[in-house]
Image (spheres, grey):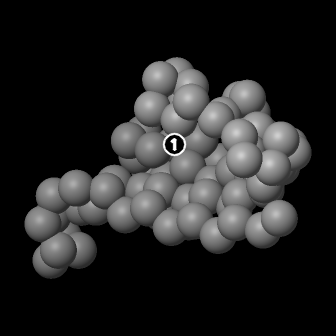
């Protein structure tokens, strides 16, 4: 699905999944959310080179008890 909004993308795959409980079905608070390392590959049109990026991503659903409203918290850090 990445290619639909990024025409330079050659794909993305999950390298390591640490936990995958985005909707909080686990009652253990330290495992709430989804944490993974992904690898994305893009073809840069101007330079005609392939770029690979690793990204550490974490997301979790905010609870009403967090006093921050409803929604999701998403944090990511990419390295080349």
Callout 1: SS: strand
Image quadrant for the C terminus?
Answer: bottom right
- Tell me what residue is drawn at x 58 percent, y 65 percent: 76
- Locate residue 59 relative to residue 18 in the image: left or right: left
Q: Is residue 1 above or below residue 21?
A: above
Count of labels in the image: 1
Residue 23 image point, x, y percent: 38, 41
Q: Is residue 1 above or below residue 17?
A: above
- Locate residue 6 relative to residue 24 in the image: left or right: right
**Residue 74, quarter of picture:** bottom left
Residue closest to the far front: 46
Looking at the picture, tell me which residue is in the foreground, 76 or 28: 76
Residue 56 image point, x, y percent: 69, 61
Q: Is residue 15 among what the camera can see? A: no
Residue 40 image point, x, y percent: 74, 43
For label 1, the residue is 21
- Tell me what residue is drawn at x 16 percent, y 58 percent: 70
- Tell me what residue is drawn at x 87 percent, y 45 percent: 49
Q: Is residue 69 above or below residue 59?
A: below
Looking at the picture, tell me which residue is in the foreground, 27 or 66: 66
- Locate residue 29 relative to residue 64 in the image: left or right: right
């Amino acid at each position: 699905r990445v290619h639909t909004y990024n025409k330079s993308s050659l794909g993305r795959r999950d390298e390591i999944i640490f936990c995958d409980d985005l909707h909080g079905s686990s009652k253990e608070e330290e495992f709430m959310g989804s944490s993974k390392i992904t690898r994305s590959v893009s073809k840069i049109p101007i330079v005609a080179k392939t770029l690979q990026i690793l990204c550490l991503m974490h997301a979790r659903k905010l609870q009403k008890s967090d006093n921050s409203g409803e929604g999701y918290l998403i944090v990511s850090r990419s390295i080349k």
